[in-house]
């Protein structure tokens, strides 16, 4: 599956190596929805690939997508 740049996986989960809390947009996520530090991104980001969740969280706004993601993972 291909990433369609919805920004959800860079916003919804917490990422301890970036001190990023749950539901907060990563400071490295650009306005083009691309990672601004792609070559130096943390291991946890490198290990993430698009999957069924991308479709499942699909919604018109980032807030709605994040809410859906958090519900899936009970966060
Ligand atoms: S949730 Fe999926 S589609 Fe959205 S940015 Fe992440 S990998 Fe891409
Ligand atoms: S470092 Fe890059 S890939 Fe990782 S959450 Fe932030 S924007 Fe997304």
Image (cartoon, helix red, strand yellow):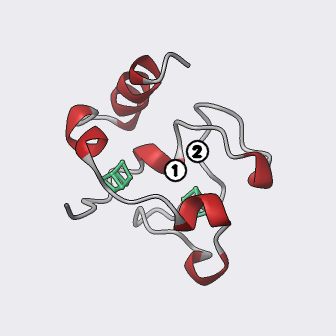
Residue behind mark 1: 10
Query: Is 13 placed left or right of 18 in the picture?
Result: left
Whether ligand 2 has any atom under 8 Å from the Cβ at mark 1 is answered as: yes
Label 2 to label 1, Cα distance in Å?
A: 6 Å
Residue at left 19%, top 61%?
1
Image: 74 above or below 15: above
Quick one: 30 or 56, which is closer to the camera? 56
Residue at left 30%, top 39%?
53
**Rendered image: mark on residue 61:** none
Query: Is 60 placed left or right of 32 in the picture?
Result: left
Q: Does residue 71 appear anywhere in the picture?
A: yes
Q: Which of the 4 quarters of the picture holds residue 62?
A: top left
| Residue furthest front in the image | 47
Q: Position of residue 19 (x, y in %)?
A: 80, 46
The mark nearer the N terminus, 2 or 1, is: 1
Query: Is 55 placed left or right of 12 in the picture?
Result: left
Image: 39 above or below 17: below
Q: Position of residue 67 (x, y in %)?
A: 42, 22
Whether ligand 2 has any atom under 8 Å from the Cβ at mark 2 is answered as: no
Residue at left 51%, top 65%?
30
* Ligand 2 image position (quadrant): bottom right
Q: Does residue 59 appear anywhere in the picture?
A: no
Q: Position of residue 28 (x, y in %)?
A: 62, 63
Image: 58 above or below 42: above
Q: Secondary structure at mark 2?
A: loop
Residue at left 56%, top 77%?
38
Query: Is 29 placed left or right of 54 in the picture?
Result: right
Q: Are marks 2 and 1 in contact (CB under 8 Å)?
A: yes
Q: Which of the 4 quarters of the picture holds residue 13?
A: top right
Residue behind mark 2: 25
């Amino acid at each position: 599956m291909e990433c369609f740049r919805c920004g959800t996986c860079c916003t919804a989960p917490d990422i301890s190596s970036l001190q990023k809390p749950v539901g907060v947009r990563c400071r490295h996520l650009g306005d083009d929805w691309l990672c601004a530090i792609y070559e130096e991104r943390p291991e946890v980001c490198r290990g993430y690939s698009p999957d069924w969740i991308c479709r499942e969280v699909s919604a018109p706004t980032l807030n709605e997508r994040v809410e859906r993601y958090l519900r899936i993972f009970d966060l």
